[in-house]
């Protein structure tokens, strides 16, 4: 009938309207979901960029810190060098005083022997030559007395005492020079060990920045799980740094600090060589002055 046909048409129209509404609702939901996914991905991408930039800044800061530390006066002008120069000056002053006293004593000895070449005198009024005994002439001779002591022994006995004094001065000089060089080299080795420690700390910090720990990877995995499944999940693992990135960051930084360490070692080597050379020249000049065959003090005493 006509009424049934109208009811049927109305039902079809209602069903079609409901179907269209359902399709529209699903379409809107899909669009909202896609918008949310795109927004989430854009946010995650921005987070990844900020994280990468932060890691880069931290890595650059670590590398800059290591270079600045290795260029401080502690490494480039260490205190031990100034202390070494002070010790060299003190040693030189002490040696000069010892040699001056020795030459002064030899001068007095020569004058005495010239006045008494044969050691003529009585044992009651003369003193035993040499400084090995409490009454020895070398310990009790008065430089200001008007008359010189008359020796009971020959000049050779007196000369031998002065030769011993010369050898003592030379041995003390060699020993002190050896100690100065050894301690300076030990201080330089310690300085290079400290520089190597700074270098190792820098590499360790860069590795910690670029190589994720298990805890960090767990957080990344949880973030990827919370972001969605399948194709809708943002690849959070791309945020986490990799060992390759660590190696790439360590390369230039290690090269820069290695150059500073090489400079520190080269400066220390130069100082050590210059110190040894100057001490050797000073010692050789003193040995030649005291024991040289031409004009040396010992040959003069022996003659």
Image: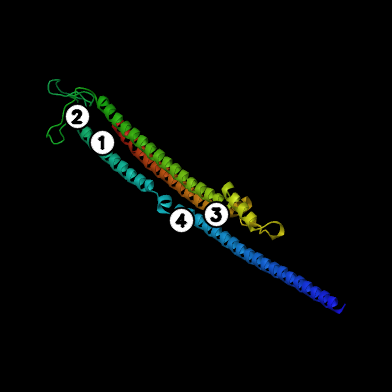
Image marks 3 and 4: residues in contact by CB distance under 8 Å: no
Residue labelled with disc 1: 102
Residue 302 occupies quadrant:
top left
Q: Going 71% across and 57% down the picture, which residue do you hit?
A: 230
Dot 3 or dot 1, earlier in sequence: 1
Mark 2 to mark 1 CA distance (whole Å): 13 Å
Label 1: element kind: helix
Dot 2 or dot 3, earlier in sequence: 2
Dot 4 or dot 1, earlier in sequence: 4
Residue 156 in the image: above or below residue 22: above
| 129 left or right, relative to 16 | left
Residue labelled with disc 3: 253
Q: Which mark is residue 68?
A: 4
Q: Going 53% across and 54% down the picture, which residue do you hit?
A: 256
Label 3: element kind: helix
Dot 3 or dot 4, earlier in sequence: 4
Residue 151 in the image: above or below residue 278: above
Crowd band around label 2 with a 10 angstrom C-alpha radius: few (<14), some (14–19), many (20+)? few
Mark 2 to mark 3 CA distance (whole Å): 67 Å
Q: Is residue 170 visible?
A: yes
Q: Nearer the viewer, mark 4 or mark 1?
A: 4
Mark 3 to mark 1 CA distance (whole Å): 59 Å
Image marks 4 and 2: residues in contact by CB distance under 8 Å: no
Residue 36 in the image: above or below residue 296: below
């Amino acid at each position: 009938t006509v009424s049934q046909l109208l009811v049927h048409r109305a039902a079809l129209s209602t069903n079609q309207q409901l179907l269209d509404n359902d399709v529209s609702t699903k379409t809107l939901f899909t669009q909202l979901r896609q918008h949310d996914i795109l927004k989430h991905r854009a946010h995650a991408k921005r987070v990844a960029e900020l994280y990468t930039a932060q890691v880069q800044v931290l890595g650059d800061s670590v590398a800059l810190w290591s270079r600045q530390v290795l260029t401080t006066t502690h490494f480039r002008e260490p205190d031990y060098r100034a202390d070494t120069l002070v010790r060299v000056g003190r040693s030189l002053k002490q040696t000069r005083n010892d040699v001056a006293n020795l030459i002064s004593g030899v001068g007095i000895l020569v004058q005495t022997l010239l006045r008494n070449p044969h050691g003529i005198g009585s044992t009651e009024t003369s003193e035993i030559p040499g400084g090995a005994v409490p009454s020895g002439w070398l310990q009790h001779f008065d430089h200001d007395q008007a008359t010189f002591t008359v020796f009971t022994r020959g000049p050779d006995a007196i000369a031998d005492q002065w030769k011993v004094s010369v050898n003592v001065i030379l041995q003390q000089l060699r020993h002190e020079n050896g100690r100065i060089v050894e301690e300076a080299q030990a201080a330089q080795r310690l300085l290079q060990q400290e520089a190597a420690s700074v270098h190792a700390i820098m590499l360790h910090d860069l590795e910690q920045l670029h190589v994720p720990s298990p805890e960090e990877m767990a957080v990344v995995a949880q973030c990827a799980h919370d972001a969605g499944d399948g194709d809708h999940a943002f690849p959070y693992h791309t945020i986490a740094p990799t060992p390759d990135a660590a190696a790439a960051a360590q390369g230039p930084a290690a090269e820069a600090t290695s150059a500073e360490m090489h400079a520190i070692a080269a400066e220390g080597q130069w100082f050590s060589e210059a110190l040894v050379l100057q001490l050797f020249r000073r010692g050789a000049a003193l040995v030649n002055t005291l024991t040289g065959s031409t004009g040396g003090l010992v040959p003069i005493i022996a003659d």
